Image (cartoon, grey):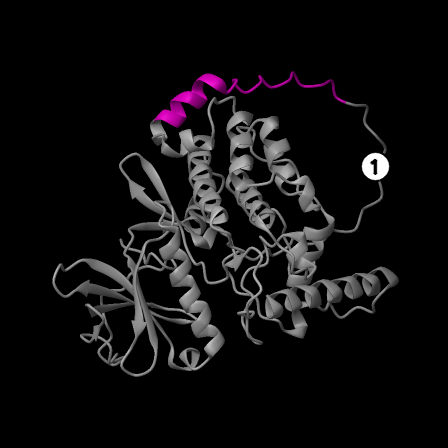
């Protein structure tokens, strides 16, 4: 099975004859379009082949209506230019960029085989520590490299972490630098009104509150949220709507990962929760520093670069030596005296129907309002705070 290196969608080789695509068989730059892969909000992704070398590539073409939006085109160009400048083994490799004959724009990039981290989490839930360590160290290597060039990703999430199946284990490829921000940026803002926000689960508190002075520590927060999710199989900040998620990001701390996944040491809890501090000045200064602390929390020597380059087998072997065995279960306690029968209690509230982090966020009024019951004082205050947070987040994305 093949997946697009841009957004992780499964390749569709069969074409519906009734759904004719005029681009099939056409030439874009030095590439011929041979099959349609998938559609996205911004454009359509194709499989392409180089005219001479027959190299297989992924080709993304902006939709016609998107191509008429100058802001969207500039962001598309920035995505290409950023990935081209970074040139890192853990960043998706872009190849070419140009204008189509009908006024749209296209980008070619390496064609990857594997799955996005979101798919792995959906299939397996919590990820084994040795695999998590190796993935996270590669992610840190990519982000530290981007930060060294002055680029802040700002939209880091499992959807944008692609895992290529390699001989020695997963090879991480960070995707989608369309939301990237240059540190000390003073040029025009590249977000138009009406742009979809995407998932809020990995937004930092400063993003959730609409602050514009974000730096690499925003990516540190998102990376820590991803590490928490890899350890537990769940998102760190759950919620039934955007407002609830943002309120929890700003006001609440998730439980220690080891309380849900005993294979993870308590030292790992301290590291990840440190990366999720509300005050960015209290977080590690870089994702690499966070990854170094993750490595040490498992008792491993060296830094994240060492374990990013190690094979999955080597990491597993090292962890088998450093990780203490799980404690034996405690002897059962003596039964407590039987208490008098209590009056029946009301049924507990239903559990939250938590949405996956891959789902897009639509800014509809129904998403920030409660049920049909009359609002109490607490609910009124909650809605007021939620409105401020959602407004701040919208301001952040519309002004960034």
SS assignment at label 1: loop
Res. 245 in view: no
Indicate whether 346 appears above or below 289: below
Give percent across and percent down for residue 390: 69, 65
Indicate whether 395 appears above or below 5: below
**How many discs mark residues in the rendered view?**
1
Q: Nearer the viewer, residue 39 or 106?
A: 106
Q: Nearer the viewer, residue 49 or 75?
A: 75
Task: Determine crowd level at label 1: few under 14, some 14-19, many 20+ residues with C-alpha closer than 10 A.
Answer: few
Q: Nearer the viewer, residue 94 or 167?
A: 94
Residue at image position (22%, 78%) is: 17
Q: Quadrant of the C terminus?
A: bottom right
Left or right: 41 with respect to 257?
left
The residue that label 1 is drawn on is 341
Give percent across and percent down for residue 212: 65, 60
Left or right: 202 with respect to 72?
right
Res. 21 in view: yes
Q: Which residues are magenta?
A: 314-335
Left or right: 196 with respect to 311?
right
Indicate whether 46 appears above or below 175: below
Give percent across and percent down for residue 9: 36, 60
Give percent across and percent down for residue 284: 61, 38
Q: Tell which residue pokes out farthest to the left in this image.
A: 52
Residue at image position (71%, 56%) is: 247
Asked where in the image residue 257 lies, by quadrant, the reply is top right
Q: Is residue 346 magenta?
A: no
Residue at image position (42%, 62%) is: 79
Asked where in the image residue 388 lies, by quadrant, the reply is bottom right
Asked where in the image residue 37 lies, by quadrant, the reply is bottom left
């Amino acid at each position: 099975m093949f997946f697009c290196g841009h957004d992780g969608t499964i390749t569709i080789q069969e074409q519906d004859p009734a759904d004719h695509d005029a681009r099939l068989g056409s030439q874009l730059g030095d590439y011929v379009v041979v099959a349609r892969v998938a559609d996205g909000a911004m454009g359509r992704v194709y499989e392409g082949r180089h005219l001479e070398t027959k190299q297989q590539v992924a080709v993304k073409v902006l939709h016609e209506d998107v191509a008429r939006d100058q802001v969207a085109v500039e962001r598309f160009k920035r995505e290409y230019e950023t990935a081209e400048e970074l040139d890192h083994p853990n960043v998706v490799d872009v190849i070419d960029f140009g204008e189509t004959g009908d006024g749209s724009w296209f980008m070619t990039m390496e064609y990857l085989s594997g799955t996005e981290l979101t798919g792995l989490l959906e299939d397996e839930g919590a990820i084994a520590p040795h695999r998590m360590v190796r993935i996270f160290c590669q992610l840190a290597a990519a982000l530290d490299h981007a930060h060294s060039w002055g680029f802040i990703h700002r939209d880091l999430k499992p959807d944008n972490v692609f895992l290529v199946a390699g001989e020695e284990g997963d090879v991480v490829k960070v995707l989608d630098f369309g939301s990237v921000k240059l540190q000390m940026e003073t040029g025009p803002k590249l977000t138009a009104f009406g742009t979809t926000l995407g998932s809020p689960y990995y937004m930092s508190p400063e993003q959730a509150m609409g602050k514009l002075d974000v730096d690499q520590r925003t990516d540190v927060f998102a990376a820590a949220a991803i590490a928490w999710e890899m350890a537990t199989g769940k998102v760190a900040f759950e919620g039934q709507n955007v407002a609830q998620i943002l309120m929890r990001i700003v006001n609440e701390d998730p439980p220690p990962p080891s309380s849900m996944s005993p294979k993870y040491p308590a030292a790992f809890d301290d590291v990840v929760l440190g990366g999720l501090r509300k005050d960015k000045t209290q977080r590690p200064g870089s994702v690499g520093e966070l990854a170094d602390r993750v490595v040490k929390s498992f008792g491993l020597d060296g830094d994240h670069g060492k374990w990013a380059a190690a094979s999955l087998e080597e990491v597993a072997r090292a962890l088998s030596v450093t990780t203490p065995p799980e404690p034996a279960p405690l002897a059962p306690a003596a039964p407590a005296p039987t208490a008098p029968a209590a009056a029946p209690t009301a049924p507990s509230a239903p559990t939250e129907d938590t949405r996956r982090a891959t789902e897009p966020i639509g800014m509809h009024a129904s998403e920030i309002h409660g049920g049909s019951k009359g609002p109490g004082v607490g609910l009124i205050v909650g809605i007021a705070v939620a409105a401020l947070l959602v407004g701040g987040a919208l301001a952040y994305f519309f002004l960034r």
